[in-house]
Image: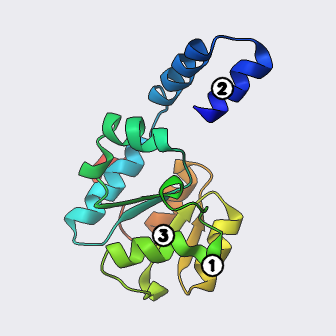
Amino acid sequence: DDVNRFISEGTGLDFEMVTRMFLEGVADMRVDMRLLDLAKTLVARNISVGLVTGNMDVFNQITIERHALYDVFPVIVNSCDYGCLKHEQDGRLFDIAMSMLGCGRDYGKSLLIDDSARSRAVFRQKGGHAFAYTEYAAFKHWADSNLGLLDSTPAFDG
């Protein structure tokens, strides 16, 4: 609301209209179903999976519910709930997620798939592995070659 109010005051647009447009935009955000399918596959194989995101409170209010993300990710850690981003405070959000997953600080067998170089660097400093995500096809090729998770899973074909 603070940001919407700032935009409203700066542009002269009605606050309620700005808020409605913002919420509609959030609701229209797309999630790559192939990545959700990957997470479901990993969870089904008893591999710990979590989502650590740098987002606003509307992610919790709209996106998680709209895409049933708690049905996919047993653990979701959102930066707005902790007052820091993934790369800040020595990667505190990763520590929180690892703890919630029951992994403690054993990063040696963990993988971060992220588009942020700073987040990947912090995760690697903690002893984890990281993949620089740009688009699904590149990730699928890498995962097929390095993880052996996708090549035998029909849900990921195409």
Q: Tell which circle, 2 or 1, labels the residue nearer the N-terminal end.
A: 2
Q: What is the crowding at mark 2: few (fewer than 14 residues within 10 Å), some, or many (at least 20)?
A: some
Query: Sequence order check: which comes first, mark 3 or mark 2?
Result: 2
The image shows residue 93, relative to residue 9, as above or below, that is below
Q: Position of residue 130 (x, y in %)?
A: 57, 72
Residue 1: x and y, percent?
57, 31
Q: Mark 2 is on which residue type?
A: Arg
Mark 2–mark 1 Cα distance, whole angstroms, equals 32 Å
Find disc 3 in the rendering and name its residue: 145
Q: Earlier in the sequence, mark 3 or mark 1?
A: 1
CA gap, disc 3 to disc 2?
A: 48 Å
Camera-near label (2 vs 1) is 2
Single out the mark in the foreground, 3 or 1: 1
Say which element carries label 2: helix
Q: Is residue 147 visible?
A: no
At x 33% / y 73%, what residue is drawn?
A: 100
On residue 90, the disc is: 1
Q: Give left or right: position of 83 versus 88.
A: left
Q: Is 105 in front, or is 108?
A: 105
For the residues bearing labels 2 and 1, Cβ distance under 8 angstroms:
no
| Residue occupying the point 61% across, 18% down | 18
Tell whether 31 sits left or right of 66. right
> Of residues 58 and 70, which is closer to you in this image?
58
Q: Residues within 10 Å of mark 1 (few under 14, many from 20)?
A: some
